[in-house]
Amino acid sequence: MCGIIGYTGTERVASDILLTGLSGLEYRGYDSAGLSVSGESLMVYKRRGEVSALEAAVPDEGLDGTAGIGHTRWSTHGPPTDENAHPHTDCTESVAVVHNGIIENDQSLRDELEASEHTFESATDTEVIPHLIENALTTGASREEAFREAVSRLDGSYAIAAVFSDSETVYAARHESPLVLGIGDDGHYLASDVPAFIEYTDRVVYLDDGQFARINPAGMVVTDAQGAIVETAIETVAWDPEDAGKSGYDHYMLKEIHEQPRAIRQCLRQRVTELDGDVTIEELASLDCDGPVQFVACGTSYHAACYGAQLLREWDVSAQCFLASEYDAASIPVSDGTLVVGVTQSGETADTMRALRAANRTGATTLALTNTVGSSAVRECDHAMLIRAGPEISVAATKTFASQQVALAMLASVLSETCSAPPVKRLRTLPDQVQWVLDTSNARSIAETYEDADAYFFIGRGYNAPVAREGALKMKEITYKHAEGFAAGELKHGPLAMVSDRTPVFALVTGDATATRTLGNVTEVEARDAPVVAVTDSPADVDQYVDHVLEVPTAGPRLTPILANVQLQLVAYWVANRLGRPIDKPRNLAKSVTVE
Ligand code: AGP
């Protein structure tokens, strides 16, 4: 997956806008970056590495032109090199193209184009597009017709932008990859996501699959695949540009961890009544579900989904949780009454989208639980519930996990007839309790104590089991160290063999009944010399069994795990910080994984 941006305006140097926009999109990929600005000829700059490398390559005074496109890449076809960086051009260098997605028929198109004397400079699937445009132009097609003709030859998923030499127009098309247009006072924008241009405008138009756009300084036109003009709705996004900056924190991840009280408040706002804790989710007023619930999700969102499924089961609703990449609607019984919920921060994850599309085909009702207005998940599901966490830039998901858990607790209470009000009522005090954890946490000193460990293990039972797995995922992705999370009872069935005095075990000891049993597992690892850190809401009872305590307030068995997770996020962050890792952009990863 990658990030793309386009700009055309009257007053600004396009390269400055494009570079700023690419910084806002770097979470989508950061192994190479490039841009092209239209002048008498096309100016193209591209570099392996982060946007800063591209910035250093572009002349200080910027490029003389007011229209251009840019790209930040996460490699799928071809390694991250200068040659494979986007934009790609045709043989005559009159059109430059950037692309996010995968062209599935690129090899057959490449064979066809090479047979007609086109020369390729890169190993990417994208490069077929400018050559297809070049071909269409030689038949006398206009630039817009040539762009449309080229796109019509593509199989796969794409958000594409193209700019021609000596032109103020940027062309774009979307199919199964996100694309949003921005309407500014002195120019128009297009991008994979709003942070690319939020500094300049908050008025946006989300493109639908199969739509094309043409932007120039005078305006924008959206059409369907046949060229017929499509009416579009202009939306105003509620993001503050400050939300997309680091606000003094060293990393977005730390900022986002600290934003959790606010994120949870936003998620709850106008959904839980002050008096009795009744939940009303306006977006779901028309949701009528009395069948089983299936969750599909990946990574951190999968851990949140497992938590949601557990809540529903406790409240007498049949619920299962599937890794989206393993979900096969053909072999999993889905009926008209089944509700399939895609839990996805980005709303664009390819595995989750594939699962949701499969569910849509079976006649099940689908619901997107997401952070991203206008995302593919929102557009393609029957219903959508927004988690309202605000922009999350760090690749490692933190505040969106907390918001997903809170949203799932509310969703569970809406779907269940037996849900008891107290846990939901307790949600209202959760933001202050998260703040207490942030203000008092000793995670940093524990991280310092164990920064050299060989591996980290995380154990928990019940609602703490998915949190243990999430703690390990966070540790892995930002520290690059071995970490694993288990249901605590499973430890003795194999993983115990790996435990030693160099493998600290983080035990989630919260919740009345399960806590005692988890303490039993603590004694098992202590007997093998492992240092133990308990994350607990009852330190007085637990202290004697463990080496260190990370305390959390009591929020009941269902919600305390949300607080415990904050401590684990902080431990992972501080270990990664001590190790000098690039925390916001870990190697090999990207924020939104739009390939299967
Ligand atoms: C979380 O830290 C990861 N970056 C990753 O596991 C992520 O949660 C997963 O790719 C799913 O993303 P989504 O929520 O946008 O669908």
Image (cartoon, rainbow, N blue to C red):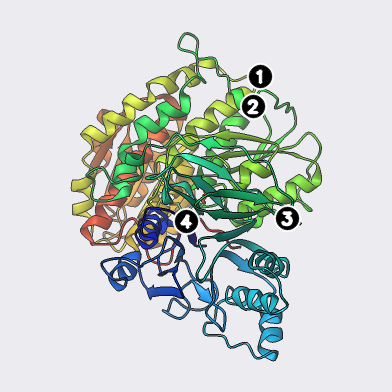
Q: Which residue is mark 4?
A: 8
Please state which of the two labelled residues, at mark 3 or mark 2, is closer to the viewer.
Answer: 3
What residue is drawn where x is 38% and y is 40%? 565
What residue is drawn where x is 55% and y is 19%? 279
Residue 264, x across and y down, in percent: 41, 30
Q: CA distance from mark 2 to mark 1?
A: 16 Å
Q: Determine whether the residue tagged by mark 4 lies in a helix, strand or loop.
A: strand
What residue is drawn where x is 39% and y is 48%? 471
Q: Is residue 530 left or right of residue 482?
A: left
Q: Which residue is mark 1?
A: 417
Residue 577, x across and y down, in percent: 24, 56
Residue 34, x across and y down, in percent: 42, 69
- Pointer 2 or 4: first along the chain: 4
Q: Is residue 347 left or right of residue 198?
A: right
- Pointer 4 or 3: first along the chain: 4
Position of the C terminus by quadrant = bottom right
Amino acid type assigned to the residue bearing label 1 in the image: Glu
Circle 1 crowding by C-alpha within 10 Å: few under 14, some 14–19, many from 20: few
Q: Residue 284, labelled with which disc?
A: 2
Q: CA distance from mark 4 to mark 3?
A: 21 Å
- Labelled pair 1, 3 in contact (Cβ < 8 Å): no
Residue 476 visible in the current orientation = no
Please state which of the two labelled residues, at mark 2 or mark 4, is closer to the viewer.
Answer: 4
Say above or below: 286 vs 524: above
Amino acid type assigned to the residue bearing label 3 in the image: Gly
Residue 517, x across and y down, in percent: 43, 37
Amino acid type assigned to the residue bearing label 2 in the image: Leu
Q: Residue 227, labelled with which disc?
A: 3
Q: Determine whether the residue tagged by mark 1 lies in a helix, strand or loop.
A: loop
Circle 4 crowding by C-alpha within 10 Å: few under 14, some 14–19, many from 20: many
